[in-house]
Image (cartoon, rainbow, N blue to C red):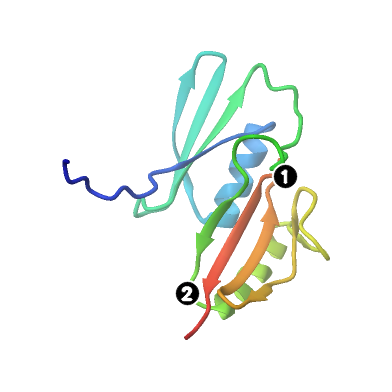
Amino acid sequence: MPTVTPPRLHHLAITVTDLDASVRWYEAVFDVRHLMDVPHPGGVGRILADADMQLMFALHRHDSNAGELFGEATTGLDHAGFVVRTRADLEAWQEHLESNGVVRSDTADKPLTQSPIADEPYGSVLVFRDPDNIQLEFFAPAAH
């Protein structure tokens, strides 16, 4: 059996309803910048990345998209999770998200909302939603 090199995530590709608005939001929240547009049949992908090319998003517009919001209860993506080092980092992200229009709520169940930080035995989690209701999470492992 051949030995394989463990993969790492290269990019996260997301279909959005308003490409320009989503580009602005992802740039502001994740400190990524537009690199290039990649046309594809029936639409275009816009590639965003941080300065080190370690965090990349491919935001896609499809001409056939009817503008419906994302729902994690259907087959496909449930959510994307990003790790941070500490719970204090999550608290800083709460403020940063709020300054970018992601309001605090009892639950992150609508576009541009964020939940309170949930402290679990395995770590702490901050759930939030992008403009298309895509669920994103920041996770800080429990300190042992």
Say left or right for 19 vs 5.
Answer: right
Q: Earlier in the sequence, mark 2 or mark 1?
A: 2
Is 126 drawn above or below residue 144 in the view shown? above
Is 45 drawn above or below residue 94 in the view shown? above
Residue 47: x and y, percent? Answer: 46, 37
**Residue ID at (22%, 48%):** 5
Please name the residue that numbered disc 1 is placed on. 133
Outermost residue on the top side: it is 41
Mark 1 neighbour density, 10 Å: few (under 14) some (14–19) many (20 or more): many
Q: For this rendering, which residue is in front, 110 or 53?
A: 110
Image quadrant of residue 126? Answer: bottom right
Q: Amino acid at mark 1?
A: Asn
**Residue ID at (76%, 57%):** 108
Residue 76: x and y, percent? Answer: 60, 36
Say left or right for 54 vs 133.
Answer: left
Q: Amino acid at mark 2?
A: Arg
**Residue ID at (58%, 80%):** 88
Please name the residue that numbered disc 2 is placed on. 85
Outermost residue on the left side: it is 2
Picture quarter with the N terminus: top left
Secondary element at image label 2:
loop
**C-alpha separation, residue under disc 2 versus residue under disc 1:** 25 Å
